[in-house]
Image: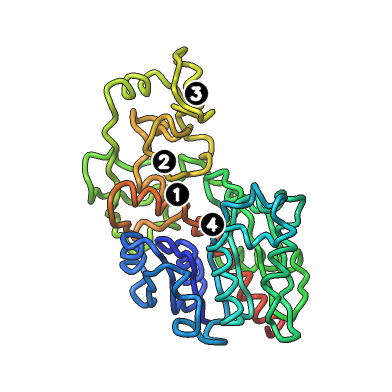
Amino acid sequence: MNVVDLFSGCGGFSLGFKQSGFNIIKAVEFDKTIAKSYMANHPQTLMINEDISKVDNYDYFQKNEADVIIGGPPCQGFSMAGARIRKGFIDDERNYLFRHYINIVNIINPKVFIMENVKGILSSNKGEIIKEIERKINITQNYKIYHIYPLLVNAKDFGVPQNRERVIIIGVLDNKIDIDKEIKNTKANILKKIPTFFDNVMIKDALFGMPNCIGDNLISYPKTAYQEYLHGNSKGVLKNHTQTNHSKKALERIKRIKPNENYTSLQEDINSIHSGSYGRMSFNGISNTITTRFDTPSGGRFIHPIYDRTITPREAARIQSFPDDFVFSGSRTSIMKQIGNAVPIKVAYFFANLTKRILNEYNT
């Protein structure tokens, strides 16, 4: 079963599908550094490192070459959808990337497509966004249509120690499905293979026992069931486990913060718009959404539960359910972007299994 990954980033979505047995034949990523990181972790996939507006054509993609398309196109124009819907939501110039996703779906004509996006896509313009997606994606399907199923999901419900809400939009060609039934059966099938998959996972399950970072290539063997699940082929070697050097002022503030506290306990005027600024995690809780600024104390609740620093890229990757043998390359800023923007691997794995069930059950 072949897959094309659009807006692939470093390949979190791809990895979940690969773990489920899919063959990722092509990926599109514009950022050159991030594309290199993808290629290092997915060497069998053809990486198209190009602006998607230049590749949404028959020179790069062919009809029926993939059973599934996955990806999360940015849609910055959602807030203006109400003002522009009469002209067509997709015509908002800030949503041009989204248009190219649709163009490639209409070229390949996959049996299923899976689109990940922000929670706001459901509420924008009182739900008209989803209807507009359905209209645009079905414009050239030759009497067959994609039935669209939008789902609001939270990573914590998939055994990920993170409160991360996202919308997953599933499109199934020419078949209506009982989505609730298929989700239930997918869960049951995964539990047969991995009984602990949906267990509630805390920060301690992800980070406990990891050495405090004094350099890269440290050795740490699994201490919990979750860590065992993420162990992969790392042989205990922790790559990307390097800390940020904080300013003297920031470090002084960090030392005064206790678990589950934030800037409000400092009794200072902190110049940050983030409500969780200078927040310290707790081993007995879960993380807020991992963002692209998890190395910044003022950027959210990203201070380590016991060490006086923000979490490292490796620790953030564990909270995103990346296996330890997935190595990120590029600058620190790029690596944070790769991790923060990724689909959590366990979430991707679940929807890969759901997709496989849809393909088999409905002979799509």
Q: Earlier in the sequence, mark 2 or mark 3?
A: 3
Mark 1 or mark 4, whichever is nearer to me = 4
The residue pinned by badge 3 equals: 261
Do the residues under discs 3 and 1 have CB atoms within 8 angstroms? Answer: no
Q: Is residue 272 above or below residue 212?
A: above
Q: Which residue is mark 4?
A: 74
Mark identifier at residue 280: none
First in sequence: mark 1 vs mark 4: 4
Where residue 294 appears, as percent x and y from the top left, is: 41, 40
Q: Residues within 10 Å of mark 4 (few under 14, many from 20)?
A: some
The residue lying toward the viewer, choosing from 233 and 338, is 338
Q: Residues within 10 Å of mark 1 (few under 14, many from 20)?
A: many
The quarter of the picture where the C terminus appears is bottom right
Residue 302 % position (x, y): 43, 35
Q: CA distance from mark 2 to mark 4?
A: 18 Å
Residue drawn at (49%, 70%), measured in percent from left and top? 5
Q: CA distance from mark 4 to mark 3?
A: 33 Å
Question: Residue at left 57%, top 81%?
Answer: 107
| Secondary structure state at the residue bearing disc 3 | loop
Residue found 28% across the figure and 26% down from its top: 247
